[in-house]
Image (tube, rainbow, N blue to C red):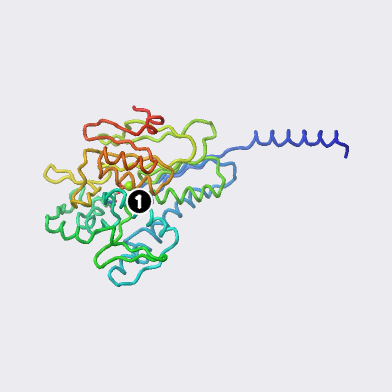
Amino acid sequence: MKRKQKVFLLVVLSGMLLACAGCVRIMTYTAVDTVMGTVSSQTIYSSREEDCFTSEIKDLIAGLEQDTLSWRVEGSEVARINAAAGSGAGVQVSEKLYADLEILLKLSEDSGGAFDITIRPVAELWDIDGWAAGENIFGKQPVHIPTEEQIALALSYTDYEKVLLEDGAVELPEGMALDLGAVGKGIACDRVFLYLQAKYVQGAVVSVGGSVVTIGKKPDGTQWQIGIVDPWDTSAFVGILYLEGTHFVSTSGDYERYVEVDGVRYHHILNPATGYPAESGVRSVTILCDSGILSDALSTACFVLGEERGMALAEAYGAEALFVDTEGNISMTEGMKQVFQER
Ligand code: ADP
Ligand code: MG
């Protein structure tokens, strides 16, 4: 073929390819499911003729809960670690869980223990899961407010420094137990991200409870919009985050799970130093960063630490943070100001 002909053919072929790219149809797949005891919503933009994304994501999150994170499901990795506490034998776990536990223990240390994955005995004493099931909220059962002695005893079985990670195995002392309740939804977002990345979708936004992952871009070129819940009116937002590309966002708030007894409000984010619900002058903390597990863990840690120390911790992790304090004031890191618009 002559050079001129070759060039002509190349031009025609590129023209056809461009025309084809222009006519690719982007499909939108949406679903809302109940997983991990919370609501998960998924919106996926893809040119591929696949409608299995959303059901596979649901299975993936349910499987993560079932096989790895739940302390209630016999045989899950966390349940096996807890069951072996005090036996002197380490429990071999998956590489992913081991890596996640390393991240969480480092954060426990960096937060001075404000975040503690061994909080389980105290959470159990308060019966936080009972509140979540609604039994207490609707007054079917009397709410159990623990005594100071009970709290002191439960606290003596918490201490992240006693968790032993060695050669892929995890070991706990007698009476201690792991609680990944603060990070399960963030870990789920990490796994959803890996799943969708391998599917080459054009864009997606998936939420699991108070944790969200955004991936790629929207077909219409507009930004992702993530609402930050108003703690005083959970059907409203205090503002919106406008994001482009891949991000992880998690919010921890005292309005998520709580009970009221004799006019006192008890919520589900505990201060590991006291064994009582954290009172740090904030009502919610939102973290924006490039990891689901960290956004979720940091939101809990920063809630316990309060605005000043929480802001410093978030910055040390290169994360953006937004605090809503008990007076309704909003404060945030510089990077968060760039993407947040108050309502
Ligand atoms: P939500 O579950 O509403 O997203 P969080 O992410 O803040 O809220 O997690 C709260 C859960 O984490 C509690 O139900 C408990 O199991 C656990 N938890 C509470 N306080 C702490 C803490 N200081 N450190 C680690 N885990 C905690
Ligand atoms: Mg959290």
Image coordinates of residue 88 in percent, x first then y, are 31, 72
* Corner quadrant of residue 32: top left
User: Which residue is labeled 1 in the image?
Assistant: 183
Q: What residue is drawn where x is 38% and y is 51%?
A: 35
Image coordinates of residue 337 in percent, x first then y, are 37, 30
Image coordinates of residue 60 in percent, x first then y, are 45, 54
Left or right placement of residue 222 versus residue 124 in this view = right
**Residue closer to the observer: 145 or 55:** 145
**Residue closer to the observer: 57 or 283:** 283
Image coordinates of residue 185 in percent, x first then y, are 37, 49
Q: What residue is drawn where x is 19% and y is 46%?
A: 266
**Residue closer to the observer: 166 or 210:** 166
**Residue closer to the observer: 92 or 214:** 92
Cβ at disc 1 under 8 Å from ligand 2? yes
Left or right placement of residue 275 versus residue 86 in this view = left
Quadrant of the snapshot with the C terminus: top left
Q: Amino acid at mark 1?
A: Val
Left or right placement of residue 232 versus residue 218 in this view = left
Secondary structure, mark 1, is: loop
Quadrant of the snapshot with the N terminus: top right
